[in-house]
Image (tube, rainbow, N blue to C red):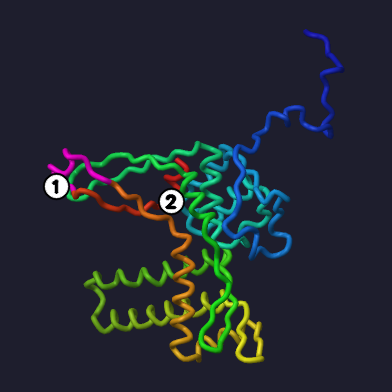
Amino acid sequence: MAEFDPSTFVPPEAPNPLQKYFRQPKVYITLPSNGRFYPEGSLNIPETGELPVLPMTAADELAIKTPDSLLNGQATVDVIKSCIPSIVNPWLMPSIDLDAALIGIRIATYGEDLDIPIRIPNTEITKDYRIDLRLILNKLLSVSFDEECQIDNIHCTVRPLSYQEFTKTSLKTFEEQRIFAVVNNDDISDEEKLSKFASSFKKLTTLTIDAMALSVTSIKIDDVLVTNQNHIKEFIENADKNVFNSLKKHFDMQREKFQIEPLKIKCTAEEIEQGAPKEFETPISFDQSSFFA
């Protein structure tokens, strides 16, 4: 039996000698929000403005592939917290930063290239197309969220929803949209279908108004400034439809800015012979269960 060497003993309270071999930041990213819209204490942004991004651990990779956790957002939050420690509370991050954060984590873990399987229209052909995630990340960083919305003499200050607000709204919307499946249910009478549709549409309208009210931080009309959320919601519910439509148009424009542009594909002569168009566009969808595969 070998003799015990005291020099090799590591007290339990001592720093882990393997710590220097832990994962290290692979990339550094800036955020589309530039750190705006984060509540105090939810973001520790370095002086450089660039956040270090660590590659995923094995536990992170398993978490991001769990359907239930993905649906309610918990897996996404856990992975962002693990890989981008500067984002202290990912639930409170503005939703416009989400894609940039996930792309940064993907690059840090697997590299800049992403192969996307694409079905060629009008054919049975499926092939992989490679995209450079750095180009998409740069595009997200080239736009900014416009906080100001002027409607006649009404000045609104707005913000993007937090990831938590966005997830809750998406889940509720998803649940309400499921009611549309009743149209294919022959066991339900037409009268009951109409009743369910009417109820669902009403709830979806309420969800839209609630989300809009959450995103408006203040309304100024002449010399009156209002920041009370209850008053803002009541105003949106009772204002002229021009106000609602103008606000909706503003939020739609902001959302479009941060959408990933579709992939433009030119088909080969062989593919065209098989019925494919000369060129087509296909959306780039970051389904996290495959995006992090």
- Specify whether 252 is left or right of 63: left
Q: Position of residue 135 (x, y in %)?
A: 47, 46
Query: How many numbered markers are drawn?
Result: 2
> In the rendered structure, which amino acid carries the disc numbered 2?
Phe
Task: Spot the residue most to the top.
Answer: 1
Q: Residue 53: give its label.
A: none
Q: Earlier in the sequence, mark 2 or mark 1?
A: 1
> Against 177, is 191 above or below?
below
> Against 89, is 63 above or below?
above
Mark 2 or mark 1, which is nearer to you? Answer: 1
Crowd class of label 1 (few under 14; some 14 to 19; many from 20; radius 10 Å):
few
Which one is in front, 135 or 259?
135
Residue at 55% in and 69% down: 146
Residue at 56% in and 68% down: 161
Circle 2 SS class: loop
Crowd class of label 2 (few under 14; some 14 to 19; many from 20; radius 10 Å):
some
Which one is in front, 278 or 203?
278
Q: Is residue 158 within the magenta segment?
A: no
Q: State which region is magenta.
A: 266-276
- Alpha-carbon span between mark 2 and mark 1: 28 Å
Quadrant of the image occupied by residue 130? top left
Q: Are marks 2 and 1 in contact (CB under 8 Å)?
A: no
Q: Which residue corresponds to mark 2?
A: 286
Circle 1 SS class: loop
Residue at 60% in and 37% down: 26
Q: Quadrant of the N terminus?
A: top right
Q: Position of residue 53 (x, y in %)?
A: 62, 43
Q: Quadrant of the C terminus?
A: top left
Q: Is residue 268 within the magenta segment?
A: yes
> Against 188, is 161 above or below?
above
Q: Which residue corresponds to mark 1?
A: 275
> In the rendered structure, which amino acid carries the disc numbered 1?
Gly
